[in-house]
Each structure stands twice: as structure tokens, then as C-alpha cells.
């Protein structure tokens, strides 16, 4: 079972050069992703003079997030695995692919990266407000929770299949674009309902900068639940006990 492979790690990990490099990789990848994704929404608002949401805006959000995540995962993959998402890191932890202590380093770096990106956007745009995640009219918190669980399940399942499965072979080459595409596709599905976050850090940065926390818990609970389900299912059905090797001190 995947739960038996959960590793806490050693406090010494935090001082290891490879762990520090991995955290910095997550920090900079998150800045790239949030700056592009959040910034594209702000640019659209400026072009439309803060007009109402439209199908065109949803498509543009999907494309910008897909492209941005493709790049962010690619540039971080060598050093950190290119998680660029606390939920992905949690899924990796549940499947025994990263220790808890290194996960905490990643989470701190990811959250800081998102906040920094939003601050940079606010400064660069002359004080425009970064758009926080919120529920559309008629959408309950439970509707949004189901959306976030299912969409993040699809994301983390894709991460496992293309990037974490020891048997992935050449499929690993397309992992960044597959991960970007599933996020873009999910935005087309859930964007009109709850913004389609799938990523607690992406929700956290705008919430900090605007100090708007309404229903914020949904954007943590949903992705973490979806990530855990995906990790447990994929790890136990497709990887199994024979597909894992013990974590070394340099594993992430």
C-alpha cells in the first residue's frame, strides 16, 4: 500500500544543497506560472475595460495557464521534479516519492513564489488588483469542492502517469506538455464555476495580496483530496510494491 511508503525524512535535508536548489527551482517556476496565468487575466481585464466574463476570456485563460505551466514544469523538472503545485507535492508525498520535510520546503517555496508574482504584477500594472478565486453565482462550496477534487485528481493522475511512474519510459518526455494540457482543459470545464484552481499556491498569492479569503479553504481541501486519491489509486494499481525503490537522501 502507498501509505506504508510515506517518509518523514531527516531535519538535515533542509540544509542539503540539492534540497535548497530544489526549493529555489519551485520558487522561480511558481513565479513564472503565476505571473503568466494571473497576468493574462489582468491583461484581458484591461483590454475589455473590466468587462464581464466571456467565453473568449475563458479560452485565453486556458491557453495562458497551459503554456505557462508547460514552461514552468520544464524549467524546474531537472532540479525539483517541476511540481509547481502544493497538491502535486502532496500527491508525491502520499505515494512515497518525496519526504515530508522536503515537501514542506517545496510548499514554502511555492507559496512564496505565488505571492511574489502577484506583488510584481500589482507593481507592474500600476496597482491593478490581482484576481482572486471565487465561486460564480449559483455555485455552492460543495459544488466547487467536487470540481476541485475531480480536476486535481485528473492533474495528479497525469503527473503520476507521465512523470513519476518508474515504467514511464519515453512518455516522460511529454510530461510537461501533458501536465499543461490537462490544466488548460480543466480550466475550460471548471473555470466558469469556481475559477478552476487545482493549485493552492495559485489561489494563495492573490488572496494574500487582495486579503480576500472567502471560501479560500475550498481551494486547499479540494486539490489535496483529489491529489491524495489520485496518488493512492495510481500507486497501488499501476506501480505496486515492486515498482518502488527506497528514497535516498537526494530523492525529491
Image: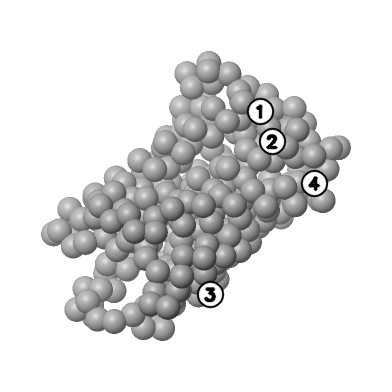
Q: Around disc 2, counting alpha carbons within 10 Å, would you say few (fewer than 14), some (14 to 19), or many (20 or more)?
A: many
Residue 146 in sight here: yes
Vertical side of 221 occupied by 106: above or below: above
Residue named by callout 2? 96
- N-terminal label among 2 and 4: 2
- N-terminal label among 2 and 1: 1
Q: Out of 168 and 117, give the one closest to the viewer.
A: 117
Residue named by callout 4? 236
What residue is at 68 percent from the left and 53 percent from the top?
A: 230
In percent of width and height, residue 249 lies at 63, 22
**In the rendered structure, are the residues bearing label 2 and label 1 in contact, judged by CB atoms less than 8 Å apart?**
yes
Vertical side of 175 occupied by 251: above or below: above
Q: Around disc 4, counting alpha carbons within 10 Å, would you say few (fewer than 14), some (14 to 19), or many (20 or more)?
A: some
- N-terminal label among 3 and 1: 1
Where is residue 124, by image quadrant? Answer: bottom left
Q: Secondary structure at mark 2?
A: loop
In percent of width and height, residue 82 lies at 53, 45
**In the rendered structure, are the residues bearing label 4 and label 3 in contact, judged by CB atoms less than 8 Å apart?**
no
**In the rendered structure, are the residues bearing label 3 and label 2 in contact, judged by CB atoms less than 8 Å apart?**
no
Residue 189 is labelled as: 3
Q: Say whether residue 48 is left or right of residue 26.
A: left
**In the rendered structure, are the residues bearing label 3 and label 1 in contact, judged by CB atoms less than 8 Å apart?**
no
Residue named by callout 1? 7
Q: Around disc 1, counting alpha carbons within 10 Å, would you say few (fewer than 14), some (14 to 19), or many (20 or more)?
A: some
- N-terminal label among 1 and 4: 1
- N-terminal label among 3 and 2: 2
What quarter of the picture does the C terminus occupy? top right
In percent of width and height, residue 141 lies at 46, 65
Amino acid at each position: 500500500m502507498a501509505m506504508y511508503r510515506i517518509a518523514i525524512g531527516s531535519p538535515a535535508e533542509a540544509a542539503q544543497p540539492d534540497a535548497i536548489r530544489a526549493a529555489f527551482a519551485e520558487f522561480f517556476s511558481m513565479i513564472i506560472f503565476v505571473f503568466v496565468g494571473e497576468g493574462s487575466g489582468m491583461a484581458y481585464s484591461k483590454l475589455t475595460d473590466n468587462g464581464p466574463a466571456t467565453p473568449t476570456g475563458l479560452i485565453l485563460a486556458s491557453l495562458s495557464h497551459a503554456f505557462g505551466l508547460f514552461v514552468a514544469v520544464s524549467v524546474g523538472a531537472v532540479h525539483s521534479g517541476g511540481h509547481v503545485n502544493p497538491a502535486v507535492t502532496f500527491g508525491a508525498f502520499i505515494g512515497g516519492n518525496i519526504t515530508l520535510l522536503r515537501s514542506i520546503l517545496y510548499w514554502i517555496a511555492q507559496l512564496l513564489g505565488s505571492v511574489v508574482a502577484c506583488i510584481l504584477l500589482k507593481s507592474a500594472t500600476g496597482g491593478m488588483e490581482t484576481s482572486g478565486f471565487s465561486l460564480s453565482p449559483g455555485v455552492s462550496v460543495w459544488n466547487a469542492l467536487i470540481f476541485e477534487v475531480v480536476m486535481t485528481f485528473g492533474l495528479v493522475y497525469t503527473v503520476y502517469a507521465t512523470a513519476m511512474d518508474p515504467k514511464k519510459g519515453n512518455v516522460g518526455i511529454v510530461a510537461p506538455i501533458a501536465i499543461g494540457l490537462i490544466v488548460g482543459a480543466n480550466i475550460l470545464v471548471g473555470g466558469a464555476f469556481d475559477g478552476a484552481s487545482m493549485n493552492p499556491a495559485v489561489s494563495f498569492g492573490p488572496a494574500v495580496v487582495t486579503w480576500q479569503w472567502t471560501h479560500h479553504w475550498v481551494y486547499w481541501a479540494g486539490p489535496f483530496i483529489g491529489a491524495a486519491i489520485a496518488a493512492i489509486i495510481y500507486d497501488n494499481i499501476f506501480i505496486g510494491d515492486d515498482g518502488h525503490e527506497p528514497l535516498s537522501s537526494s530523492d525529491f
